[in-house]
Image (spheres, rainbow, N blue to C red):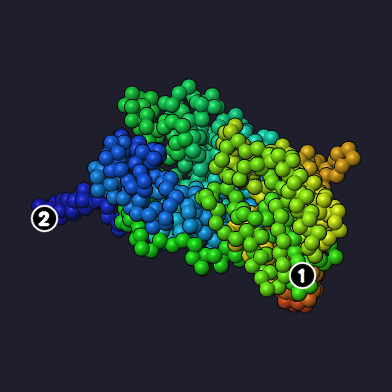
Amino acid sequence: MKNRRLILPLCLMALFMSACVTKDYKDPSLPPEERARLLLSQMTLEEKAAQLYRVAEQTFVVDNDVNVDSLKRYLPHGTGIVYLKMYGDPKEYAQCANEYQRYLVENTRLGIPALFGGEGLHGFMAQESTYFPQAIALGCSFDPELAERVYSAVALEMRSRGVTQVLSPVVDLARDPRWGRTEECFSEDPYLVSRMGLAAVRGFQGRTPEDLKSGKHLIATLKHFVGHGQPEGGRNIAPVASSMREVREMHMYPFEVCVKDGNVLSVMASYNDLNGIQNHANKWLLTDVLCEEWGFNGYITADAGGVDELFMLQGLAANEEEAAKRAIEAGIDLELVRHVTTFNRIPDMVRSGKLDEKYLDRAVLRFLTQKFKVGIFENPYVDTSKVVYNTDEHKKLALEAAQKSLVLLKNEGNLLPLDAKKLNSLAVIGPNAAGVHLGGYTSDPHVGVSILEGIQEYAEGRFKVNYAEGCKITKQTPSFWGDNETPNDKAADAKLIAEAVECARRSDMVVLVLGDNVSTCREAWAETHRGDRDDLNLLGAQNELVEKIVALNKPVVALVLGGRPLSINILKENVPAIFQGFYLGQEGGHAFADVLFGEVSPSGKLSVSMPRNVGQYPFYYNHKPSLMRSYLWSETSPLYPFGHGLSYTSFDYADLKIDKREIIEGDSLTVSFMLKNVGVREGTEIVQLYLHDKVASVTRPVMELKDFKRVTLAPQEKKMVTFTITPDKLVMYDIDMQRVIEAGDFELMIGASAEDIRLKDVFTVKK
């Protein structure tokens, strides 16, 4: 009897041990984390390290074919991630990815497939992709639902070609438009960025684990952690020009929302120096805050060259080994190489005792876990017959996004919308009228509908369109990728201006299309490739062109395109109707024509404040109370404020109601008011709710956006609009840098912009 009692537990233990032994990382029924641990336990030091850095793929791809012999030579242990530089036919791209993946799966010891990375800021950066409005333009839509649909479309086009990690969205704050990467940001406001960024993450990754494995979504990468959008002097990668309190409350907020609410799977460190430590070596930032405090469980991606800059630029390491050690110990998991690979030194560093293997294992485990989540072990290849790109459905979405992103700044005397029946001829003039202006991180050549083409298509059979370039912004053809661009010759511009004046003379009215281009507003990654500015005026001869056209006393409409808000004082003072377009995407020409002629009513609102001059910076609507003293003989107010944007109708705000005048800390309250369309056309109003903590332990911004809604109303229609003020909208960092809700009075403001507040009230929070 005793033997029988002993035999049963031993049998059960044997079965349990047998089950453990037979567990296989290839078993899809196991959780991703467990599969990653099982795989990690079988890997050599070289195989582990090979997962954590990118090798230049030009070595392996020749004439769009994968060179297998080179792969065997340079990648004997596999690789973690691949970036294909081949921008040709979409199906060839997918085929190239499949061939690369086949080598890794079939010819390496453990058969670990690679992630394929790509840029998807506002469309997949590859030929024949759909290009949507640039982020700064899409932010003006104040439409997270639209953003989720846009980035779902981008994800589908990328994943169908084999791409499984996108280096997007950018959730930096656009706090200094001197910075050439302003166009990549949604807004200057942390709340708006958090809503648009969360929508982008959900669009890219989907909302469920099943979505991510569906073949329609991919791993999103938040950029750039943290403070990248407010560098000193507006110069790319300069030290962060914000206090640690502002970094916590403003710059970190969108990242935290996307980590906690969006479960984003990758975060990219920024090049910047924060409090004396470059962010790729900042353990407090990458491990203490991101991973431990926020619970981030994805992997941390280095920006291209961010690790090697620790020794090549920042002086935080003496050589490649020291840079690799500082980065991986701080929390960097994946190195994107620009100059030299540092992570390939890790195996020798572990053997020599210079690096504890636990840091290598941590990075590999985090990275492999996401590979299992995205489903590439079960489905490493894509069906090249089902590649999706620039479909009619996506073009329609791009048109909708462009229409909603266009901002009407001024409409003096209700000049707009134009009546085509009353026009015999229209002059379209300016350096941005012809050509497709998409913004940075797009493939060449740019394909889409220019402003000129959009107006010409609309005008066919209705009126004549006359065109003149007017002047050039740069002597060279605009290029995001080109180097050493120069201003145009003054004599050449004088000739172009004279031609434009004659074009305008023989036309009933004029549309001026001005602004920046991809050569003058872009990422400044070298002294030969600059994109930051110390002047925000219209470049080149554009102001002179405006003066000459305005002097003809013709009705003029101006459209400003580009990647940053500019000081367009000359337009505000002299032109009756002005649009801000930023970069509207491939359907921008159609969208502008639709709005110009009233087929669609404008609804966009500025996601950034527009300056009177560059000397106002730092300058944003949610500033501290002491930033109020006026300059000598000048004004401190914006040229156009955050949240500003007109419609072809008018809206009335009335009957503000608050359900509770006093709430206990942790409670919510409901705010409602009546919005009415008092015009004769249908229109959409973006109503904005702001709060201000009147007395606090630390100085608080004069106002902070805490909610918004797009409301579409027919003529004379009215609707009750309701907001809920939840506890998270009242949180701040107190004098001890602790997150709290302080007791006191809060001013409630609802309006059409930060400077057009229609309704006000006060409520009180008690302990």
**Outermost residue, top side:** 318
Kindly indicate the quadrant of the structure image that contains residue 465: bottom right
* Three-letter code for the amino acid on which mark 1 is drawn: Asn
Q: Residue at x 43, y 26 (%)?
A: 320
Number of disc labels: 2
- Residue 103 coordinates in the image, percent (x, y): 28, 47
Q: Residue at x 57, y 63 (%)?
A: 398
Q: Residue at x 49, y 65 (%)?
A: 391
**Residue 619 seen anywhere in this rendered image of the structure:** no
**C-alpha separation, residue under disc 1 versus residue under disc 2:** 103 Å
Looking at the rendered image, the quarter that the N terminus falls into is: bottom left
- Residue 379 coordinates in the image, percent (x, y): 32, 57
- Residue 659 coordinates in the image, percent (x, y): 73, 67
Question: Is 78 above or below relative to 158?
Answer: above
Question: Is 322 above or below relative to 438?
Answer: above
Question: Dot 2 lies on which element?
Answer: helix
In terms of depth relative to the viewer, which is nearer, 175 or 351?
A: 175
Seen in the image, is 622 located left or right of residue 35?
right
Seen in the image, is 670 located left or right of residue 569?
left
Circles 1 and 2: CB atoms closer than 8 Å: no
Q: Which residue is mark 2?
A: 4
- Residue 3 coordinates in the image, percent (x, y): 10, 52
Which label sits on residue 424?
1
Seen in the image, is 80 located left or right of residue 149?
left
In terms of depth relative to the viewer, which is nearer, 479 or 25?
A: 479
Q: Earlier in the sequence, mark 1 or mark 2?
A: 2
Q: Bin the neighbour count of mark 2 within 10 Å (Cα to Cα): few under 14, some 14-19, many 20 and up.
A: few
